[in-house]
Image (cartoon, grey):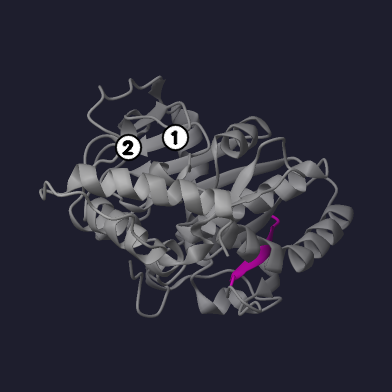
Amino acid sequence: MLGPRLLTLLSALAGSYIQATTAAPAPVPTPGLDDLFNNILDDVVKTGKDILGDDVPSASTGTLDPKLLPKIQYFAEFAAAAYCDPNHVVGAQVTCAKNVCPEITANNITTILEFANTRDTDTTGVVLRDDTTSSIVISIRGSKSLRNWLANVQVELKDVPEICTGCKVHSGFHEAMEEALPSVMKSVQKLRIENPGYGVVAVGHSLGGAIATLMAEEFRKGGVKVDLYTFGAPRIGNEQLSSFISKTGTNFRVTHTNDPVPRLPPVLLGFQHISPEYWISKGDTNIKASDIQIFEGGINRGGNGNGPISLNTPAHAHYLLPVEISSCSTGGFEF
């Protein structure tokens, strides 16, 4: 349940927000919680209204170093592999249908742990040992329906002082991470002992990117260096949390032009992104490093955050691969 102070703030924000966006001159009563989310959903998702205002777009700080593009593309394949059922068999060699992950299929990569159907949140993913690049990879699958998460009351921000002072996290994403964390932690710790020269990498697409971000931070708290690669991830917490995670390790938060998911949950509710953002500024064919611009800040009005929210949900599936990143998933992605 939402805390009284948060509920009061949301109600106040909802009242002013709805008054400002309705054509009716008469005062609008303070809505209930359902009305708040419905009105935000209407303006943010259905009409594409930019709730950040019409400020001048943020300037890019540069483009991607060409030497980094192959690595980002490589770990995008791991994010895609989490959607493929054959990879959820312990001891299996990683493989993907529809040519989703050709490079990692060709390499020597083995499934060490699979997790699915966790008690409340259905967090799903795999821990993989990549003997070709000497990596331990935690790959978390995205949700079949992100809208279910965003409409849920678990969108409230939860205090996490164990991470940093003033840190608040999306409570639903945090619960999803916590349910999978014990088994993942045990598996990764064992692999690090068995393979002392291997690095640890966390990856995820969509909701999987949000969970991977929080899981990477759990490992970093324990002194483990974790590189993070996310693709089309939503916002995961408030300014303090996002700023803190931005500084604790190497983070590649990749977004795509017209992808609506990184614009949610709304800034209106107190959410910000980790920084920097690596924004793919064109379609997904023949992407070059010069097509990926870098933007700094938890709230920036460049990159994916520039202009009204697009309803081009297919853009959410296109991340550097020859086919959709969720191609292995039965039924595909539902917004």
Q: Using residue 320 as the reference point, say whether residue 208 is left or right of it.
A: right
Residue depicted at 67% across the width and 73% down the height: 114
Q: Position of residue 256 (x, y in %)?
A: 33, 45
Q: Secondary structure at mark 1?
A: strand
Write down the residue under mark 2: 305
Write down the residue under mark 1: 277
Residue 305, visible in the rendered structure: yes
Residue depicted at 75% across the width and 42% down the height: 220
- Could you say which disc has been placed on residue 14 in the image? none
Magenta part of the protein: which range?
123-131
Reply yes or no: does residue 242 show up in magenta. Answer: no
Q: Using residue 128 as the reference point, say whether residue 259 is left or right of it.
A: left
Q: Position of residue 44 (x, y in %)?
A: 27, 51
Q: Is residue 26 above or below residue 111?
A: above
Location of the C terminus (image quadrant): bottom left
Residue depicted at 41% across the width and 70% down the height: 148
User: Main SS of the magenta segment?
Assistant: strand
**Mark closer to the chain start, 1 or 2:** 1
Dot 2, crowdedness within 10 Å: few (<14), some or many (≥20)?
Answer: many
Q: Using residue 116 as the reference point, say whether residue 22 is left or right of it.
A: left
